[in-house]
Image (spheres, grey):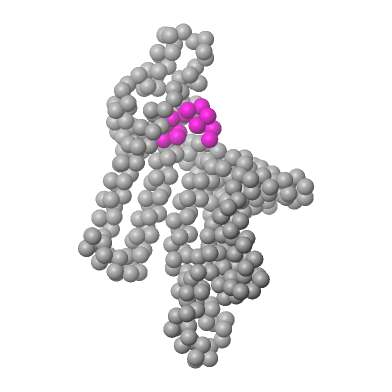
């Protein structure tokens, strides 16, 4: 088991190193942030002084090695626009994005599993077919368009919920959160549902497919032959066995939700990492862009590593197949 974890850690470090090179080259080789940082009327001396101050006068390979040295000590550079640590800027916005992502995941679970289970148990009913039709819309509709429609209906026409912002926050273990205040919760609902829509459709389809497959298994037939109640068969035998792949996919989707919350945060003016990265791209704030992308890469690696370890604990065949590979 320890050998398996160490091997996965080594692979994760290698992936992180390769991605750092790709991310750095992809960001630093494009555009010239100096054009946006100083006035067009500045003379050549001031321009050269600014370029040297940001370290942009060095070759790209030398800038990369400086970045690696600083990254190993926890410094991912200083923001060109804000003049402060890029990592500190991102971590300051991280609680808002995490709150939005967690709320979106909970909505996807709360709606997706019951609806998918209903569609799987009654596939030929009009409700089951309607649920699957709605799930297709969840996959197909663009996130930004759905967000605008939610604002138009619930904020503009009905006036039930606010159209943007985070609302009132309160501290929970020193971290500002919105869901503990009524105003913050009202601001949270629309962007969280918009971000959860794709995952609701995904969970519905996974649950439906798992339920239909489980109903054909021998242990379900044996439970029916024993005369167990239908609710017990579904709640214990069917649901318990289909939750493992669903939880795995949801765990992997959590990283995607954080990474692709940019559109939702922009539409609803949610002050998270996504809005920060959009603002940074506009002004070519390279350190913030690189720090954000590296944080997302690290997040995906950690989530995949945790899923691999949990799988290896639950199923020893994973460790055996890995060793053979």
Q: Is residue 58 above or below residue 18?
A: above
Q: Quadrant of residue 286?
A: top left
For the point 38% across and 52% down, which residue is it?
A: 302
Q: Position of residue 163 (x, y in %)?
A: 69, 44
Q: Nearer the viewer, residue 223 or 102?
A: 223
Q: Position of residue 94 (x, y in %)?
A: 50, 44
- Which quarter of the figure is the N terminus placed in? bottom left
Give the magenta-colored segment's residue range: 278-290
Q: Is residue 19 magenta?
A: no
Q: Quadrant of residue 21?
A: top left
Res 174 seen here: no
Res 8 seen here: yes
Q: Is residue 124 above or below residue 251?
A: below
Q: Is residue 279 magenta?
A: yes
Q: Is residue 91 left or right of residue 312?
A: right
Q: Position of residue 299 (x, y in %)?
A: 41, 48
């Amino acid at each position: 088991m320890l050998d398996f974890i160490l091997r996965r850690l080594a692979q994760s470090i290698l992936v992180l190193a390769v991605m750092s090179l790709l991310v750095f080259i992809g960001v630093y080789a494009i555009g010239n942030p100096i054009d946006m940082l100083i006035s067009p009327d500045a003379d050549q001396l001031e321009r050269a002084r600014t370029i040297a101050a940001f370290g942009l006068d060095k070759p790209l390979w030398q800038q990369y090695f400086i970045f690696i040295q600083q990254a190993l000590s926890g410094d991912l550079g200083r923001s060109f626009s804000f003049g402060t640590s890029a990592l500190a800027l991102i971590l300051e916005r991280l609680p808002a994005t995490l709150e939005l992502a967690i709320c979106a995941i909970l909505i996807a679970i709360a709606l997706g599993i019951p609806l998918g289970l209903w569609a799987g148990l009654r596939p030929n009913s009009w409700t089951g077919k309607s649920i699957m039709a709605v799930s297709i819309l969840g996959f197909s509709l663009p996130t930004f368009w759905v967000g605008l429609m939610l604002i138009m209906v619930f904020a503009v026409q009905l006036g039930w919920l606010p159209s943007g912002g985070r609302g009132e926050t309160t501290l929970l273990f020193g971290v500002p959160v919105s869901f503990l205040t009524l105003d913050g919760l009202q601001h949270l609902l629309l962007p969280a549902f918009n971000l959860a829509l794709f995952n609701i459709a995904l969970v519905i389809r996974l649950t439906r497919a798992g339920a239909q497959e489980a109903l054909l298994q021998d242990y379900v037939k044996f439970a029916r032959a024993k005369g167990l109640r239908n609710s017990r068969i579904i709640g214990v035998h069917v649901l318990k066995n289909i939750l493992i792949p669903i939880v795995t996919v949801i765990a992997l989707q959590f990283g995607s939700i954080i990474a692709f919350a940019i559109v939702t945060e922009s539409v609803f003016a949610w002050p998270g990492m996504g809005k920060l990265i959009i603002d940074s791209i506009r002004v070519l704030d390279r350190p913030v862009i690189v720090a954000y992308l590296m944080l997302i890469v690290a997040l995906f690696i950690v989530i995949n590593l945790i899923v691999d370890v949990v799988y290896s604990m639950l199923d020893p065949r994973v460790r055996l197949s890995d060793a053979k590979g």
